[in-house]
Image (spheres, grey):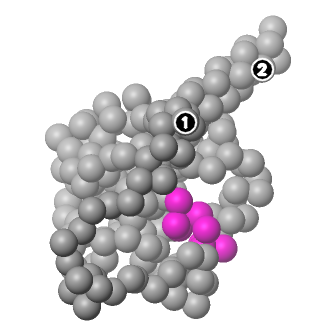
Amino acid sequence: MKKSIITTLSLMATILIIGSCGGGGSTSEKSTNETEQPETTQTPSEQPEAKPESKADPSTYDPKRGEGKFNESNVKLGALDAAMADKGKAIAATKCNSCHKQTDEKLVGPGWKGVTHRKTPHWIMNFITNPDPMISKDPELQAQLEICLVRMPNQNLNDEEARNILEYMRQNDEVK
């Protein structure tokens, strides 16, 4: 009985992950759009320089900060904000809990228990809002991927939603 419940829950979680990772638009639309050339009125000297490719270059990756716009200067924590944690709990219920438990048990992804003690707040915020580049560069995330076998999909959370989830994680880790 227990085994069939676990199997059913695992199947449902897999379906949710696959559904949440679905593409937006058909391939025929994409190929049509890819062949169109963007119109520009800029001369070549006025066009912005292309940014250097930063794919999977581990030498540019800071494992304490992660990759993204958050750092020590723009993620400041104080005492636990219960209202933010409640909002984070509601967001997690719809976007995160199909893959993550609040314990240290793995569901599809790793459990959240203790994450705020293991990772810096800005690393967590960067990962919540920018998972793909971090999975490609962070050795711990790559090792986690080997265990979980599923990349965390980008949930397209805005900064406020991510901050609320961080506060919920702090509450889950019994931060006062």
Q: Position of residue 111 (x, y in %)?
A: 58, 46
Q: Nearer the viewer, residue 155 or 106?
A: 155
Q: Position of residue 93 (x, y in %)?
A: 40, 30
User: As displayed, is residue 52 above or below residue 145?
Assistant: below
Mark 1: which amino acid? Ser
Q: Secondary structure at mark 2?
A: helix
Which corner quadrant holds the N terminus?
top right
Tell me the tag on residue 28.
Answer: 1
Q: Position of residue 151 (x, y in %)?
A: 63, 50
Tell me the tag on residue 143.
Answer: none
Residue 30 appears left or right of 111? left
Residue 84 appears left or right of 106? left
Instruction: Please provide the residue range marked out in magenta.
Output: 132-139
Residue 47 figure quarter: bottom left
The residue under the point 25% across, 55% down is 159
Mark 2 residue crowding within 10 angstroms, few (<14) / some (14–19) / many (20+): few
Q: Position of residue 119 (x, y in %)?
A: 47, 68
Task: From the image, tell me which residue sits under label 2.
Answer: 7
Q: Nearer the viewer, residue 38 or 74?
A: 38
The residue under the point 40% across, 29% down is 94
Mark 2: which amino acid? Thr
- Gap between marks 1 and 2 measured at Cα: 36 Å
